[in-house]
Structure formats: structure tokens, C-alpha cells
Image: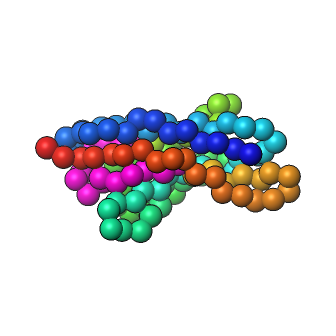
Amino acid sequence: QAQLVESGGGLVQPGGSLRLSCAASGSSFSITTMGWYRQAPGKERELVATMGSSRSTYYDDSVKGRFTISRDNAKNTVYLQMNSLKPEDTAVYYCNAHVNQGGRWLDYWGQGTQVTVSS
């Protein structure tokens, strides 16, 4: 079973930057895609960015040019560098890992980290 632990959230002023980290631990699984989702109050969880095992990336239009996803496969860790943050980026950010475990495809989630963009 995999466990995901996130860090790096906090309060930042508009235009500021934050870097989120998510480390996966456990055994007997192979991670394919890792990514970040977010959920703002009263809204559904939405996809922010993903990176596949081949390092192919996807970004939601709302974060293109501002956010950068990266990954250290040796550490099973994914990062989200967030620049030029806007108040509308305020949300709980969740890490996701899509894994193959014993021939089954499973999704694991982190506990969430709060990002607040406010002056």
C-alpha cells in the first residue's frame, strides 16, 4: 500500500510563490502518473497538473505559464512550483499517485495542504 505525504502549503501574498512537495512511500507498487489537484471552498476538486513516468506533462489552462510540475522518480516525489499566485489559486491542494499494485491499478491521495493567497 502507498502513502502520500504533502508539504509546502501556506499563506502567501498575490504575486508570490510556493513550492509543494509530495513523497510516496510504501512497497510493492509501481507509480505511473503523479499529479496535483485542488479544491476550493464550495467547489469540486479539479485537476491542476500531472506528470507521467515518461515526464509528459499536463497543465490546466488556469495555471499554464505560472505553475511547474516536476518529479524525482528515485525518491517517488512530485513537486509543484507555483509562481505569480492569484487569490483564485486559494484551495486545498491534493497530491495523487496512479499506481500498479499486484496487477491492479489504484489511485492514492495525500491528506491535502492548504494554500491561501491573500494580501
Q: Is residue 26 left or right of residue 82?
A: right
Q: Which residues are magenta?
A: 81-95
Please provide percent x and percent y for residue 55: 61, 46
Q: How is the image coloured?
A: rainbow
The foreground one among 15 and 100 is: 100
On whether residue 92 falls in the magenta region, the answer is yes
Please provide percent x and percent y for residue 46: 44, 64
Outermost residue, top side: 75
Total number of numbered labels? 0
On whether residue 112 falls in the magenta region, the answer is no
Residue 17 vs 53, above or below: the answer is: above
User: Which of the 4 image quadrants contains residue 81?
Assistant: top left
The quadrant of the rendering that contains the C terminus is top left
Residue 47 vs 14, above or below: the answer is: below
Please provide percent x and percent y for residue 101: 80, 51
Outermost residue, left side: 119
The residue at the point 78 percent across, 38 percent down is: 27
Residue 65 vs 70, above or below: the answer is: below
